[in-house]
Image (tube, rainbow, N blue to C red):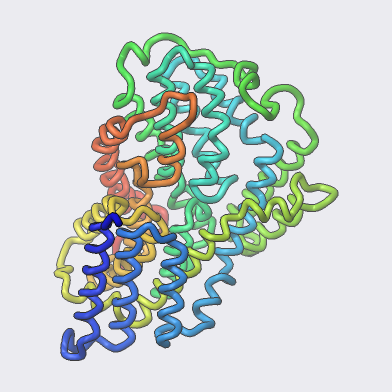
Amino acid sequence: MTVNYRQMATLCVALSICAVLVVPGNFPGLGGDARITLAVFALATCAWIGTPIDDTYIALGAGLALTATGVISSDALFGTLGDDTVWLLICAFVLAAAVSRTGLAGRAAAFLVSGARNVRQLVHLTTAALVVTAFAVPATSGRAALAMPVFLALAKVLADRKRLVVMLALLFPTVILLSAVATLIGAGAHLITVSVLWDAVGQRIGFTEWLLIGLPLAVVSSHLAAEVVLFTTTKRADREGPVQITAEEIQEHSERPVTGPWEPAETRCALLLATVIALWCSEPLHRVPPAVVALIGAVVASSPALGTVRLKDALKTVPWSMLLFMAATMAMGLALSDSGAAAWLVGGIPLDLPPWLFLAVVITVSTGAHLLLQSRSARSSVLVPLVVAAAASAGVNPVAAALASTAAAGFCHTLPASAKPVTLYSDVPGIPTYTPGDLLRMSAVLAPLTAVLVLLFAVAVWPLLGVPLTP
């Protein structure tokens, strides 16, 4: 029998923390609920880090433990599944299934990419196309899967220029991950952040507010990352010479039509998606919640007369495991805040720092957290409640601190296993792709640049958009 020393070490650390917490004489002033919460969090975090157990199973077990011990009520645990942000995500996946069924995304990508005349134009037009997908497809793994046919078509057209294919293989997941911050539905971690802020400080961030804050950062960071990928994976000789990719060439390697007249289903889907996005962005005018708009869009997208996908087929594409994981971690975040555990954890940390330096520490920790916790939602469920509690003590706006932490956590490119999109594009049968060395070389440059960019936005840009640095 093989002994897994990492799992044994993780179990020992978790049990040691729990043993210290349950001794009544230790940590005076720490309440019983807070002790239980910290013990459950220690076990869950160590299990996420050091065991192969499914992340959702661990999160559900932690939520159940907190409910069974009375730290949170059963209504609080099950109520997270009825949260409007969860419904927003479910309906967004139904809309994404309708878009995927029509092949509309491939047609739009071919239109953009076919305008490239050199390597740099190809890189930035591809980046722009990937940023736009954040409005149509929720979650980074879904966007990575949707973009795969486009990548395969480009790879086959550029088969004689291997380094450019490798560069594109790295560009796709890099931009998908960094551009997720553009929209509220870009990642499950965003919904956890919104939930924690609502429970902790009573401030709700809607789709429009998130778009105003996140889209500029997504655009700048994505195009900056595109330049980094270009220069770390190619040589000057690779970047020289014209590039001319026609829509007809992409069509040869695509299953869905990307040229010619639009089919009626594509037209209906495009109009529906444009209407939904417009209603999301104009929420302050009509006051219809984004989740209700998404539900209307999902019903129309799956209707017999106007829809492009059957509802039962669309619901099969919804990652129910991820939604359960999100709901459970939202309940864990609620317990961390309400029990006083988060405030106690940050109580002993010296927080007499200038606001910009406090944010720099938060961003640095959040950027590097993916090396321990691969799940972005798990990182937010652990970090955001602590960041919010610490920000209140440090005199920093908790909303700015939480958003900075969530945005910085979008960097998870160091290892092939750091994020699902990175894993997906690291091994594509029949296509040359990047090596771990390519990934590390790119990450060594991109990680500090991304952290500095998030800090710059939090300090200089977001205050102009209604998110001040201090309360």
- Depth order, front residue of 124/155: 155
Name the image quarter holding the C terminus: bottom left
Q: Quadrant of residue 105?
A: top right
Residue 469: tell me if it is visible.
Answer: yes
Image height check: is 341 above or below 103? Answer: below
> Left or right: where does residue 26 sit relative to residue 337?
left
Residue 148 lies in what quarter of the image?
top right
Give the quarter of the figure containing the N terminus: bottom left
Give whichever of 291, 461 is nearer the camera. 291
Q: Residue at x 45, y 15 (%)?
A: 118
Point 24% across, 52% down: residue: 364
Residue 150, quarter of the rendered image: top right
Taking the spot 65% from the left edge, 41% from the top edge, the residue there is 100
User: Is 360 left, or right, of 145 in this rendering?
Assistant: left
Residue 194, position as x, y percentages in the image: 46, 64
Apparent side of residue 26 relative to residue 222 in the rendered image (left or right): left
Residue found at the far bottom of this picture: 24
Nearest the camera: 311 or 356? 311
Return the x and y of residue 392 as percentages of the image width and height: 28, 72
With 294 as the anchor, is 151 left or right in this view? left
The x and y percentages for residue 321 are 53, 60
